[in-house]
Image (tube, rainbow, N blue to C red):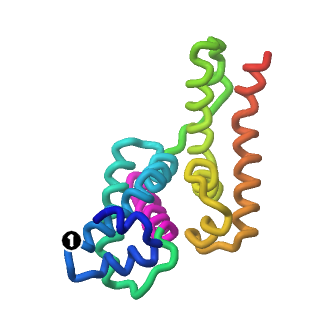
């Protein structure tokens, strides 16, 4: 019976979620979960930059989504709605824990062993991403790690597409600035 749900639109799945038949509701939820779980988890990991927080928040997102189903009449953008829930929970968690961003200085980038270069670049990217202002970080995560288009990001964050484009441009520029000392060191 799950195949029946695999071909349904998000709007149809959302309607099935409201079904009094618990089996139908459960299967619709499972299909939505299978479509968006990886993207939502990626968002949490990139925004919170911590495994323990990410996993707890990730579980809460789908619980809150399921609980809110009966309160919303219709939904045309399930992914956007999930991102809004994720965003709110991640921001609340960051405020609650008062996460302090790590300052980066050039001393952190003195390693020059090619065998660990890729891991270092990945670590640098994640650290640099975490150092970005929140408004840039979340649009870059959505665009580059979740493969969302500008329109979907704009809907999820309740922004115009042009603001999303500007934030992505500025965020990438800032990332290049943050990463420049290390990249220059690699090239020498």
Q: Nearer the viewer, residue 120 or 1?
A: 1
Residue 19 lies, in percent from the top left, at 27, 81
Looking at the image, which is closer to me, 70 or 106?
Answer: 70
44 over 113 or under it: above or below = below
Residue at the image point whose x is 65% and y is 30% from the top = 105
The magenta-colored residue range is 79-98
> Is residue 127 on the magenta stretch?
no
Q: Which quadrant, please, contains the C terminus?
A: top right
Q: Residue at x 40, y 88 (%)?
A: 73
Q: Residue at x 47, y 44 (%)?
A: 49
Q: Would you say the magenta stretch is mainly helix, strand or loop?
A: helix
Crowding at dot 1, Cα within 10 Å, few <14 / some 14-19 / many 20+, comes out as few
Which residue position holds label 1? 23
Q: Secondary structure at mark 1?
A: helix
Question: From the viewer's perspective, is 143 left or right of 70?
Answer: right
Res. 27 visible in picture: yes
The residue located at (41%, 62%) in the rendering is 89
Residue 1 location in percent, x, y? 28, 65
Q: Quadrant of residue 62?
A: bottom left
Is residue 98 visible in the rendered image? The answer is no
Residue 170 image point, x, y percent: 75, 54
């Amino acid at each position: 019976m799950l195949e029946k749900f695999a071909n349904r639109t998000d709007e149809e799945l959302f309607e099935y979620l409201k079904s009094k038949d618990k089996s139908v509701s459960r299967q619709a939820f499972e299909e939505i979960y299978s479509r968006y779980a990886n993207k939502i988890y990626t968002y949490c990991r990139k925004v919170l930059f911590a495994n323990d927080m990410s996993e707890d928040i990730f579980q809460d997102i789908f619980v809150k989504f399921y609980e809110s189903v009966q309160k919303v009449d219709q939904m045309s953008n399930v992914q956007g709605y999930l991102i809004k829930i994720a965003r709110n929970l991640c921001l609340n968690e960051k405020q609650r824990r008062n996460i302090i961003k790590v300052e980066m200085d050039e001393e952190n980038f003195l390693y020059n062993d090619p065998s660990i270069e890729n891991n270092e670049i990945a670590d640098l990217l994640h650290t640099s991403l975490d150092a970005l202002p929140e408004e840039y970080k979340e649009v870059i995560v959505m665009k580059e790690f979740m493969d969302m288009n500008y329109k979907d990001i704009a809907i999820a964050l309740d922004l115009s597409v042009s603001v999303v484009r500007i934030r992505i441009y500025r965020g990438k520029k800032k990332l290049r600035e943050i990463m420049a000392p290390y990249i220059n060191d690699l090239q020498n």
